[in-house]
Structure formats: C-alpha cells, structure tokens
Amino acid sequence: MSPDPSVIEFIKNHHVLTLATCAGEVPYCSNMFYALLENEFCLVFTSSGDTRHIAEASQNPIVAGSIVLETEITGKIQGLQFCGKMIKVSGKLKTKAIATYLKRFPYAVLSGTPIRIIEITYAKFTDNRLGFGKKIIWEKSPEAFRL
C-alpha cells in the first residue's frame, strides 16, 4: 500500500531532513538535503563515509528522522517523523537514485560524495491544516520497525 498522497506531497515540497542514528546507547542527529524516490518511498542523500552518521548507520542501519515545516502558526503545523533502514545502493536503484538527486540538486555533481538511501518503513505525518493534531500513519508492513 502506498503512502497517502498528502505525505508524498509534503516530502516533495521540502528539502532538508534530520537523520537520527545511534551507536551503543548514544544517539546523534545530522541534517542533510534529500530527494524522494516516490515509487520506492525512499529518501536519497549524499554523505561521505567518514561522517559520524554514516559510520553509525554502517553499524546499525535502523534510523529515524524528521522533516518539518517551520512555522509559529499552530493551524499550519506540518511534520513527518519516520523510521527506516539505510540500504545498500546498487544497480538500477543506484542509477535512479543518482539521477533523482542530481535533478533536484545539480550542483551536487561537484561534491563527489556517495549516494545513500533510506528505505522508509514507518511514517507519521502530522497536519494541523486538517484539524489540530491530525495524524496520518503509514507502515510498510506490520513487522516494520518503529519506535
């Protein structure tokens, strides 16, 4: 089952996510630009292997994150919280991920950093435009990891 179209639209309308990783019992957050692979419901970003978040995700590929609309108006609050898994990128998926990311951020071709993918397994979208505290929840499967 695909995520609600409002969730897809929200993700497509933003460009920075906060990624949470964990090593042992010590959490860490980082921010990055992303693009969405809509059909796969995956987030694509670039990051070098010597960053803390990639080192931690290499040890524990289960990650969490958020994408938010920054506003002080309660009736306009929107935000996505997600859980997922950092997956290996290869073959056709890698080609598609690179093309999608470079279409959104063409200057990234200069960075030379590897492409990364987060497969979203759980998403909770809060949209106060639909009513205070209105939540839309999506799970890839009943066994999907979530907090």
Image (tube, rainbow, N blue to C red):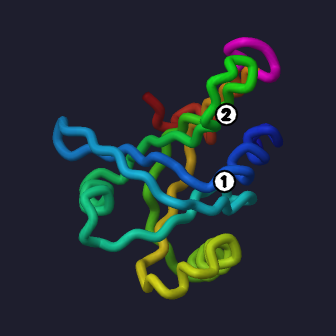
Along the polypeptide, which appears first: circle 1 or circle 2? 1
- x, y percent for residue 35: 63, 62
* Residue 133 forms part of the magenta stretch: yes
* Residue 22 forms part of the magenta stretch: no
Q: Amino acid at mark 2?
A: Trp
Q: Amino acid at mark 1?
A: Phe
For mark 1, what is the residue? 41
Give residue 49's quadrant in the image: bottom left
State the extent of the magenta-drawn residues as a range: 129-134
Q: Can I make out residue 116 in this image?
A: yes
Q: Looking at this view, is 23 or 32 the one in front?
A: 32
x 68%, y 62%: residue: 37
x 57%, y 37%: residue: 122
- x, y percent for residue 58: 29, 61
Q: Looking at this view, is 89 or 67 the one in front?
A: 67
Q: Can I make out residue 92 in this image?
A: no
Distance Cα–Cα, label 1 vs label 2:
11 Å
Q: Is residue 54 above or below residue 145?
A: below
Looking at the rendered image, the quarter that the C terminus falls into is top left
Per the image, label 1 sits on a secondary structure element best described as loop
> Which of the numbered marks, if any, corresponds to residue 138?
2
Looking at the rendered image, the quarter that the N terminus falls into is top right
